């Protein structure tokens, strides 16, 4: 069943179904954690986390320290997304595709 | 502080959290990952992003639906399934409780083990004891505005070769962290590790007056006979001798059985492995040999322009020629070989020795003073072993390094010159250490200095 879903959805990034399959497949095979670590490390190296830390500090200061994690995340997310280097996004898509193609072979 | 979590803890204990975390957040085994992959969806709308799991009953929900669940059932504690932190609906925010954090941390390590990977980055949560300690010692921060960790060293008669290396070791972050966290107590007399430990304490005591390293010099004289006497010595030789002596004394002082590869701090930090591939030109049979290294000595004979240049030459394919035939284990006859070096494992500290002193006669060394440029950020990826497959796709041991110290030789020959070092004191703040004198330096000046020994620190350290 998985194989069918995979071959149908592997190139369709915007499909909700595809997202779900990618998620399940990577969790199942354990590669999700590796991808996550890789992403975190790359973001750190690019200086992204420092930028986001500053954004968070600004928002917390604006709210006089009284802000919940969720609303902080809501406020910072749009700006933080924009700061992610385009090459890294492309790199991640490529890596996820590779994992899924490998999964199809296995 | 949230009182609801302690209330929850007293009523239900930690078991529900352990259970849900072990399956659905950290996922400790293959079977658990399978269950997680198929059952982590919002019980109302079916979406799978950013889910919270109720810790009172079996219920997963997205943000909106778990909030509804709380309204209906008054189940007020939930766990975020992507990172394992607790959410309290009365406070309407995440709460951090040490009992739960500890379990989350332990499970993350176990999950990493089950996936055969290094532990993911975790922020440090100081304990109450540690917070109290930090508050008593507010001044012990290293930054541009203070001199903590900066002290001059007396010249004890041509002992600048020692002073410059000690300044480098003192400003090596991983080494400093090891020594300042009281990791060595052996009380053997004449122990080099104790001596270095003592010097670290002196440097970070908060005093600013210069230090005399006569005990260390005496110890070196006793243990390394060719460095004894008041003559000028080679700083690189001193560096290597110091690392060796530290390694030997670590082994002598530790009660644990000696392991191979050695796990003493010196080997953990400075040792990497080189792979040397000898390839038979006839049958293409490869015989690999692995060789540990503590630094790389780079030739300057062919007028390289930069450190990268030197490294390219160091790792290029080399024909050993017809005069250096070896027996090929596959052909069983004498064959010509090619040799290629690459880096198999990277050390935390990569140090490079530019061979500025060339042996010209029996007792004669000529100094090569050509300018070799070196970067402040170095990427060693091109010099790593070329992996045949792509499994290392994500397992990237990052190969990025930052410059943190440079040793320079001033003067025209090895016997008459003077050694100084430039060290990174804090982020963008460099200090030139010339025996007693400490002067601030700009990065431009650091990068335009001649460079004899170059020290780079790995940017990302892996947790094991």
Image (cartoon, coloured by chain):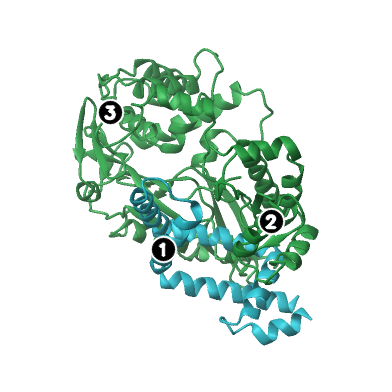
Q: Is residue B287 visible?
A: no
Q: Is residue B63 visible?
A: yes
- Mark number for residue B160? 3
**How many neighbours does mark 2 have within 10 angstroms: few (below 14), some (14-19), or many (20 or more)?**
many
Q: Is residue B171 left or right of residue B274?
A: left
Q: In the rendered structure, are the residues bearing label 1 and label 2 in contact, judged by CB atoms less than 8 Å apart?
A: no
Per the model, the C-alpha gap separating discs 2 and 3 is 63 Å
Chain for disc number 3: B
Same chain assignment for discs 1 and 2: no
Residue pointed to by mark 2: B53
Q: Is residue B355 above or below residue B126?
A: below
Q: In the rendered structure, are the residues bearing label 1 and label 3 in contact, judged by CB atoms less than 8 Å apart?
A: no
Q: Is residue B444 above or below residue B220?
A: below
Q: Which chain is cyan?
A: A
**How many neighbours does mark 3 have within 10 angstroms: few (below 14), some (14-19), or many (20 or more)?**
many
Residue pointed to by mark 1: A80
């Amino acid at each position: 069943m998985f194989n069918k879903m995979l071959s149908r959805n592997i190139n369709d990034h915007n499909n909700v179904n595809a997202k779900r399959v990618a998620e399940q497949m990577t969790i199942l095979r354990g590669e999700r954690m590796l991808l996550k670590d890789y992403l975190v490390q790359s973001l750190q190296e690019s200086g992204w986390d420092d930028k986001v830390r500053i954004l968070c500090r600004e928002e917390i200061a604006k709210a006089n320290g009284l802000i919940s994690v969720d609303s902080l995340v809501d406020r910072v997310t749009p700006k933080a997304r924009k700061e992610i280097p385009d090459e890294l996004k492309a790199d991640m898509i490529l890596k996820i595709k590779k994992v899924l193609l490998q999964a199809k072979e296995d | 502080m949230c009182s609801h979590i302690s209330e929850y803890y007293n009523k239900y204990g930690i078991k529900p959290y352990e259970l849900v975390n072990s399956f659905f957040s950290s996922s400790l085994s293959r079977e658990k990952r399978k269950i997680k992959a198929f059952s982590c969806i919002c019980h109302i709308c079916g979406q799978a992003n950013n889910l919270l799991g109720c810790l009172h009953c079996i219920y997963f929900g997205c943000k909106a639906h778990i909030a509804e669940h709380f309204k209906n059932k008054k189940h007020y504690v939930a766990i975020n399934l992507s990172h394992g932190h607790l959410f309290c609906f009365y406070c309407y925010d995440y709460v951090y409780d040490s009992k739960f954090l500890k379990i989350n941390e332990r499970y993350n390590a176990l999950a990493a083990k089950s996936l055969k990977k290094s532990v993911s980055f975790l922020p440090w949560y100081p304990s109450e004891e540690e917070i109290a300690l930090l508050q008593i010692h507010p001044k012990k921060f290293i930054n541009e505005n203070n001199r903590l960790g900066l002290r001059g060293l007396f010249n004890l008669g041509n002992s600048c070769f020692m002073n410059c290396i000690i300044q480098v070791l003192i400003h090596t972050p991983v080494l400093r962290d090891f020594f300042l966290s009281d990791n060595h107590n052996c009380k053997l007399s004449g122990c080099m590790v104790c001596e270095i430990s003592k010097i670290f304490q002196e440097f970070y005591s908060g005093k600013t007056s210069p230090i005399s390293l006569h005990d260390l010099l005496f110890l070196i004289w006793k243990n390394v006979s060719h460095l004894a006497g008041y003559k000028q010595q080679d700083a690189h030789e001193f560096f290597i001798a110091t690392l060796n002596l530290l390694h030997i004394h670590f082994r002598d002082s530790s009660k644990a059985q000696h392991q191979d590869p050695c796990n003493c701090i010196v080997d953990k930090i400075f040792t990497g492995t080189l792979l040397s591939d000898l390839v038979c030109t006839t049958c293409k049979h490869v015989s690999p040999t692995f060789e540990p290294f503590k630094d790389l000595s780079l030739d300057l004979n062919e007028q390289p322009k930069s450190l990268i240049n030197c490294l390219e030459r160091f790792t290029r394919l080399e024909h050993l020629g017809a005069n250096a035939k070896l027996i090929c284990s596959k052909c069983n006859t004498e064959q010509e070989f090619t040799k290629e070096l690459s880096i198999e494992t990277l050390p935390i500290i990569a140090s490079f020795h530019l061979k500025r002193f060339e042996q010209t006669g029996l007792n004669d060394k000529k100094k090569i003073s050509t300018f070799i440029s070196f970067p402040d950020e170095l990427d060693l990826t091109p010099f790593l072993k070329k992996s045949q497959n792509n499994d290392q796709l994500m397992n990237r041991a990052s190969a990025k390094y930052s410059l943190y110290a440079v040793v320079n030789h001033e003067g025209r020959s090895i016997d008459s010159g003077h050694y100084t070092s430039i060290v990174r004191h804090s982020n963008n703040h460099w200090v030139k250490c010339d025996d007693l004198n400490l002067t601030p330096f700009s990065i431009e000046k650091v990068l335009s200095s001649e460079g004899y020994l170059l020290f780079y620190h790995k940017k990302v350290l892996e947790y094991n």
